[in-house]
Image (spheres, rainbow, N blue to C red):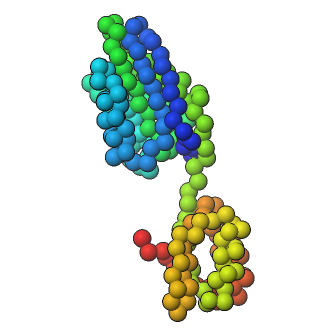
Amino acid sequence: MPYTLAVPAHSELIIKKSRFIGCVQPMADRASAQAAVDALWKQHPGAAHICWALLAGGQSAAVDDGEPGGTAGRPMLDVLRHQDLEGVQATVVRYFGGVKLGAGGLVRAYTDTIAQALLTAPKVTLQRMKTLQCHVPYALEGLLRREIETAAAELVGVQHGTLVTLQLRLPEARATAFVLRINNQGQGRVGWTEPEA
């Protein structure tokens, strides 16, 4: 089951005089990830490299930022995958200490920096959500609203026309049971349609 992070977590390692400052944080998409990296450059203008990796809804990235190819971004991405994380960005700010680490040393340094940050990162289960849309007579609106609240679903929108159209979101795993319960209580007076995007 995939996880994401509740809040950012940080680490810092000194390896052969080089300083590695790591951060793992929840991240929605690549544009947000790039903005976070740009902000890090403003905080650390003297850094030699800011390498990063992202796993977010199919928008993955592995950026070595001038380190030898495959020694920074890819190892950090592998750590995120190994921990079954989704919607997470890993960044490492490196201040060069004058001693070259070699390819193997760099892979270990970047991997260890992210692994250390993840040790303190509170993980939360990532739930896939489903949006449902139904049409009911006005007489059933109150019943449906109560059922939505009982199911701890989110009421996204309501439209009043000939029928009442309700759009709601809930965890995908509970969607089928919710639809069955509403169909039983509605006694054939509930219509389901695909939600408009």
Q: Between 1 and 124, which is closer to the camera in this rendering?
A: 124
- Residue depicted at 33% across the width and 40% down the height: 34
- The image shows residue 171 at horizontal and vertical percentages of 61, 60
Q: Residue furthest left?
A: 66
- The image shows residue 24 at horizontal and vertical percentages of 48, 33
Q: Between 66 and 1, which is closer to the camera in this rendering?
A: 66
Whether 182 is drawn above or below 127: the answer is below
- Residue depicted at 44% across the width and 38% down the height: 89
Task: Name which quarter of the figure residue 105 lies in.
Answer: top left
Q: Residue furthest front?
A: 43
Asked whether, in this view, residue 25 is left or right of residue 178, the answer is left
Q: Residue furthest bottom?
A: 162
- The image shows residue 178 at horizontal and vertical percentages of 67, 71
Whether 42 is drawn above or below 165: the answer is above
Q: Between 150 and 70, which is closer to the camera in this rendering?
A: 150
- Residue depicted at 48% across the width and 45% down the height: 87
For residue 157, say whether it is visible. Answer: yes
- Residue depicted at 47% across the width and 16% down the height: 13
For residue 108, say whether it is visible. Answer: no
Task: Name which quarter of the figure residue 19 lies in.
Answer: top left
Number of numbered tags placed on the structure image: 0
Question: Where does the C terminus fall, quadrant-wise?
Answer: bottom left
Asked whether, in this view, residue 151 is left or right of residue 41, the answer is right
- The image shows residue 29 at horizontal and vertical percentages of 39, 48
